[in-house]
Image: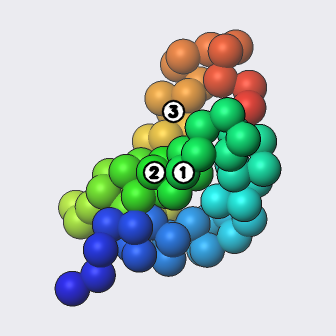
Amino acid sequence: MSTALERGRELTKKLNPDLEQILDDRYGALLPDFAESLIEWAYGRHYARPGLDLKTRQLCTIAALTALGGQTGPQ
């Protein structure tokens, strides 16, 4: 069985291969290990959960960000 971090890294390789490095470059000096924690928690524990296929999960994410409005520009 893979860990949440391994599942998260596998999923982000498909969606955004450079995400962990981008997060580390942006926040690593201020928040060490933030990138790894985010990949593990958000992608490995939540986004990779069974129940919805990836396409549906992404559509739900886009709908939620759209409903939140302008403050979600970076996403």
The answer to whether any part of residue 18 appears in the image is yes
Residue 37 is tagged as: 2
Q: Residue, x 59% and y 45% (percent of image)?
A: 32
Out of 64 and 30, give the one closest to the viewer: 30
Q: Is residue 17 left or right of residue 2?
A: right
Residue 25: % across, % down: 78, 50
Residue 49, picture quadrant: bottom left
Give the amino acid type for the residue marked by disc 3 in the picture.
Ala
Residue 56, picture quadrant: bottom left
Query: Which is more foreground, mark 2 or mark 1?
Result: 1
Q: Secondary structure at mark 1?
A: loop
Residue 13: % across, % down: 61, 74
Out of 23 and 70, give the one closest to the viewer: 23
Give the amino acid type for the residue marked by disc 1 in the picture.
Asp
Q: Residue, x 30% and y 57% (percent of image)?
A: 45
Residue 63 is tagged as: 3
Residue occupied by mark 1? 33
Above or below 38: residue 63: above
- CB atoms of marks 2 and 1 within 8 Å: yes
Alpha carbon of mark 2 to alpha carbon of mark 1: how far?
6 Å
Q: Residue, x 51% and y 71% (percent of image)?
A: 9
- CB atoms of marks 1 and 3 within 8 Å: no
Give the amino acid type for the residue marked by disc 2 in the picture.
Ser
Query: Which is more foreground, mark 3 or mark 2?
Result: 2
Query: Which is more foreground, mark 1 or mark 3?
Result: 1
Q: Is residue 3 left or right of residue 32?
A: left
Residue 20: % across, % down: 64, 59
- CB atoms of marks 3 and 2 within 8 Å: no
Q: Secondary structure at mark 3?
A: helix
Question: Which of the two labelled residues, at mark 1 and mark 3, occupies the earlier sequence position?
Answer: 1
Above or below 34: residue 18: below
Q: Residue, x 59% and y 25% (percent of image)?
A: 66
